[in-house]
Amino acid sequence: MDDKQLITVAHLRAFKEEILFELKTLIRSNNKGAEKRWIKSREVRKLLNVCPGTLQTMRKQKTIPFQKIGGTMYYDGDKINAMLEANKNIKP
C-alpha cells in the first residue's frame, strides 16, 4: 500500500465545491418546513387572496393583528395560520 499521494490545487478546489454543494443542499432541506414568523402585507394578501383594501379593512376592524414598523406592516404568520384554521369550512 502506497501512503504517499499527491494532492493538487485542483483536488482541493473540487473538494471545496463538493463541500459547498452538500452544505447548500443541507440548508435548503432544513429550511423547507420552516415558515417565516413575520410576513409582509403582500404575502398576507396572497395567502388570504384579498386585495389591499380588504386587508386594510381587516386591520381597521382588528380582524387581523399586525405591527407597523416604519411604513411597513408585519403580520404574525402563526396567528394568521391559527385564524385560517379556526375559520375553515369543513365539508362532509
Image (cartoon, grey):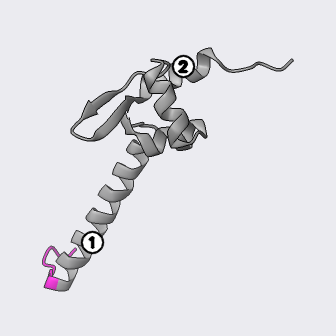
Residue 40 appears in the figure: yes
Residue extent of the magenta highlight = 1-9
Q: Position of residue 63 (x, y in %)?
A: 50, 19
Labels 1 and 2: the sequence-earlier one? 1
Considering the numbered disc 1 on the image, is that residue within a helix, a strand or a loop?
Answer: helix
Vertical relation: 4 (above or below) 32: below
Q: Which residue is mark 1?
A: 17
Q: Residue at x 64, y 17 (%)?
A: 87
Q: Which residue is mark 2?
A: 83
**Closer to the eye: label 1 or 2:** 2
Q: Position of residue 77 (x, y in %)?
A: 43, 29
Magenta-drawn stretch contains 64: no
Nearer-the-camera pick, 9 or 29: 29
Q: Residue at x 55, y 39 (%)?
A: 47
Residue 51 marker: none
Disc 1: CA contacts within 10 A as few (<14), some (14-19) or many (>=20): few
Q: CA distance from mark 1 to mark 2?
A: 44 Å
Apparent side of residue 44 relative to residue 75 in the rendered image (left or right): right
Image-quadrant location for residue 5: bottom left
Considering the numbered disc 2 on the image, is that residue within a helix, a strand or a loop?
Answer: helix
Quadrant of the drawing holding the C terminus: top right
Nearer-the-camera pick, 91 or 2: 91
Q: Disc 2 marks which amino acid?
A: Met
Disc 2: CA contacts within 10 A as few (<14), some (14-19) or many (>=20): few
